[in-house]
Every structure is written in C-alpha cells, then in structure tokens.
C-alpha cells in the first residue's frame, strides 16, 4: 500500500461513473464532467503501533460540471451528491470496500484497508484555468498500512 | 538516554502480535502500602509493602479473521488465566526492555460511533504471576536449531527466579516441532551452559511460560531452540527476565 496506489485507486473508482473524466492529480484545465484526486490535505501517521504503522489520509476529491446551463449544471451536481446510485460520487468511491480485506482494489490487490466518503463541502462555482464550473469537494478518509 | 515517542510499542498476547492493531497500551504495577505506624515511629508514618498486583489495558482497531487478530484472540481469552502477555515499549530489537507476565482477561469491549474506525478495548489483570522486567531475547522467524543472543541480566537472589515468555505467532512445515530451553552461564560466551527450564515441544501457534527454580541463574541468559520437522518455520518472540 502506498500513497500512489491509493490515489490511483480513488481515480479508478471515480472512473466507474459513466462519462466522468478523472485526473489522479491536480490539473490546470478540465473538461467537464471531471473529477480530480489531488494529494491528501492531511496525513496522520502512527494511528496504530508498528513501523510504519497505520496512516490516515484525508483527501478533498473535487468534481466539476459545465456551468453553461445553470439548471442543468446544478442537476448534474446534485446527481453526483446523492449518497447512492449510478451517478453518486460517494457510492463510486466506496463501491469496492471488502470489510476485513481492503478497498481500492487493482488486480485483486487492495490499495488501502478501508475508507469513507463522509461529507460534501463547498458546493458552488469554481474557477479552473479562467473558466467557471459548478462543483463540490468530497471529504474522503482513507486508512492504509504502508 | 532520550525521551521516547510511542509509535512502535509491541504488544503480545498469547500467540497474537497485536502491535499493528493497537494504539494504546498501558501497564500498571501496584504494591499495597500498609500502615505499620507505632508509637515508636518517632512521629512519622511507617509503611510496609503488602500485596502486589498488575493491571493492563490494550486498545486499538478491531479486526477479526484469525487467531492472531485482536477480536479472535481477546474474545477467546475472556476469563482465561495464565496467558502470557508482553509489552516492549521500544519495539522489536533484541535487548530492548520488555515487561511480561501472565494474565487473566476480565474485560473485552468493542463498538463505537458511526463513521469512525471500529475500536476495541480490553483489560487484563495479573493472575498471580510476577510482573517481570526483562529484555527481548528473540524476534523473527526460526527454521533450524539455534541459540539466541546472550542477554546480561541480574543473578537472581534466593527468592527470585528467571522467567521466559515465548510467543509463537505462526508455524508451518511438515511435523514441525520447537523445544525451547532457557539456559544460563556465568560468561557471555556460554562456555558451560546450564539449564534453567525446558518447555514442552511446540507444534502450533501459541505461547509458553518458562520459570526456573528459585535462586538459579548466573547472570547471562539465552534460549536454545531445537527445531525439527520437514521445512519447519516458526515466527517467535521471546523475552527473558529475573523477578
């Protein structure tokens, strides 16, 4: 388990949303609908004893939708904010959790022990590369042993 | 010497190494202070040492699935006495200070708040076995007969004994067998090793407690590990001390 595989795993899960263009890194321009997995905002090491032990990674996953049509943009955003369903970002991120085994699987290998998409914050208008989009930030906490 | 940030406390209960699951380990030793004051005490309270006891708490993140996971291990140990428990504050380097005893486990608790990592907490009390402050003697995988690094510890007084706790975390191979003998000598090179105690053959994951006779020990200690079988492999942690 590494931070690189965690970010790749999150990107892969977001890629299961039909039509979502995913970047496993911060970008200067986007083509909506787009999801961005930036580096974690916070990492808390040593959550359990041992070397290197259990780490907690707090991500802010961002999604952007075209603002060309205000109502359509907000409808698309709200579809992404749903707690469940095919368009739900939360459901996509948490979609391959196997309690007691792991999550964010690639070829059967988990990138993390477990995760939770606990909240959506800061829904509104974002500017990326001089273009305005409607978007939101999803608080995602990932627990992994290195 | 330097102060220590707790990040790698090894916590062993029976066959289970709970280090990677725990985020809190405490060990408390207590001696009753008995009032023996008389009129001849010259105005000062006179205290005498009474009974001793040890209590321990381990807490962390709940996991289950095998005998070495905290849920399987600690739930099975509820109400069971004579389970070796070892705490090594500085991690698994031979020679590190280790505290070990045998415990009875009266409490196991799990469950928490939605959205948080599932926690567990368990308390244990000494079952009458002394709390021993010793050293880590061995940590790792053993596949053939060998002796561990010699440790320099106290020569036991007439009322003291040499103790060893052996935690066997996993075993593999065909007809594997490990027999541990606690040895002592008066020189680090062990030119004339003497047996302090010998354990029964270990053929599966578990734990073992060895105790020598009172007053037996010469200052240097090690384990002789006799291993038999086809492609045998034992993952062990062993600690030795005098109390």
Image (cartoon, rainbow, N blue to C red):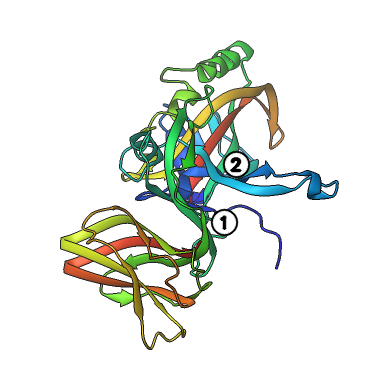
Say if mark 2 contacts mark 1, CB within 8 Å: no
Q: Is residue A18 above or below residue B215?
A: above
Where is residue B126? Give x, y as percent: 47, 44
**Nearer the observer, B93 or B164:** B164
Q: Mark 2 belongs to which subunit?
A: A
Residue at (47, 21) in percent of width and height: A88
> Is disc 1 surrounded by few (<14), some (14 to 19) or many (20+) residues within 10 Å?
many
Residue position marked by numbered label 2 in the rendering: A38
Is residue A87 visible to the viewer in this orientation of the structure?
yes
Q: What's the distance in space between the residues labelled 2 and 1, CA to CA?
A: 37 Å
**Nearer the observer, A31 or A82:** A82
Q: Is residue A10 above or below residue B147?
A: above
**Nearer the observer, A41 or B8:** B8
Residue position marked by numbered label 1 in the rendering: B89
Residue at (31, 70) in percent of width and height: B181
Where is residue B73? Give x, y as percent: 36, 40
Where is residue A38? Give x, y as percent: 60, 41
What kind of element bears circle 1?
loop
Q: Quadrant of the N terminus of chain B?
A: bottom right
Residue at (40, 40) in percent of width and height: B70
In the image: residue A104, left or right of residue B39:
left
Within the image, what quadrant is residue B197 found in? bottom left
Within the image, what quadrant is residue A106 found in? top left
């Amino acid at each position: 388990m590494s931070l690189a595989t965690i970010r790749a795993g999150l990107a892969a899960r977001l890629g299961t949303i039909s039509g979502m263009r995913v970047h496993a890194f911060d970008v200067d321009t986007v083509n909506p609908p787009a999801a961005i997995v930036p580096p974690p905002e916070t990492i808390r090491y040593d959550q359990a004893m041992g070397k290197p032990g259990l780490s907690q990674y707090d991500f802010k996953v961002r999604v952007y939708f075209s603002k060309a049509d205000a109502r359509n943009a907000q409808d698309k955003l709200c579809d992404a904010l749903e707690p469940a369903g095919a368009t739900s970002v939360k459901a996509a991120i948490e979609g391959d959790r196997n309690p007691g085994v792991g999550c964010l699987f690639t070829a059967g290998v988990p990138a993390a022990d477990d995760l939770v998409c606990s909240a959506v914050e800061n829904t509104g208008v974002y500017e990326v590369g001089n273009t305005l989009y409607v978007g939101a930030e999803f608080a995602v906490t990932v627990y992994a042993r290195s | 010497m330097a102060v220590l940030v707790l990040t790698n406390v090894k916590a062993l209960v029976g066959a289970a190494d709970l280090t990677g699951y725990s985020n809190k380990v405490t060990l408390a030793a207590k001696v009753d202070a008995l009032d023996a004051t008389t009129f001849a005490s010259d105005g000062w309270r006179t205290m005498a040492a009474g009974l001793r006891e040890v209590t321990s708490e381990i807490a962390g993140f709940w996991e289950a699935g095998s005998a070495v996971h905290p849920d399987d291990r600690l739930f099975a140990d509820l109400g069971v006495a004579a389970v070796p428990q070892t705490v090594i504050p500085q991690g698994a380097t031979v020679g590190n200070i280790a505290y070990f005893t045998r415990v009875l486990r009266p409490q196991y608790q799990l469950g928490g708040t939605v959205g948080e990592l599932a926690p567990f907490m368990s308390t244990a009390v000494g079952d009458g076995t002394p709390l021993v402050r010793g050293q880590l003697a061995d940590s790792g995988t053993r596949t053939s007969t060998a002796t561990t690094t010699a440790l320099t510890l106290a020569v036991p007084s007439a009322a003291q004994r040499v103790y060893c706790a052996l935690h066997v975390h996993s075993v593999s191979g065909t007809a594997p067998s490990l027999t541990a003998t606690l040895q002592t000598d008066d020189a680090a090179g062990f030119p004339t090793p003497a047996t302090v105690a010998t354990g029964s053959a270990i053929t599966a994951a578990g734990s073992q407690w060895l105790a020598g006779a009172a007053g037996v020990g010469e200052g240097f200690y090690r384990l002789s590990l006799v291993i038999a079988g086809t492609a045998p492999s034992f993952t062990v942690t062993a600690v030795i001390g005098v109390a």
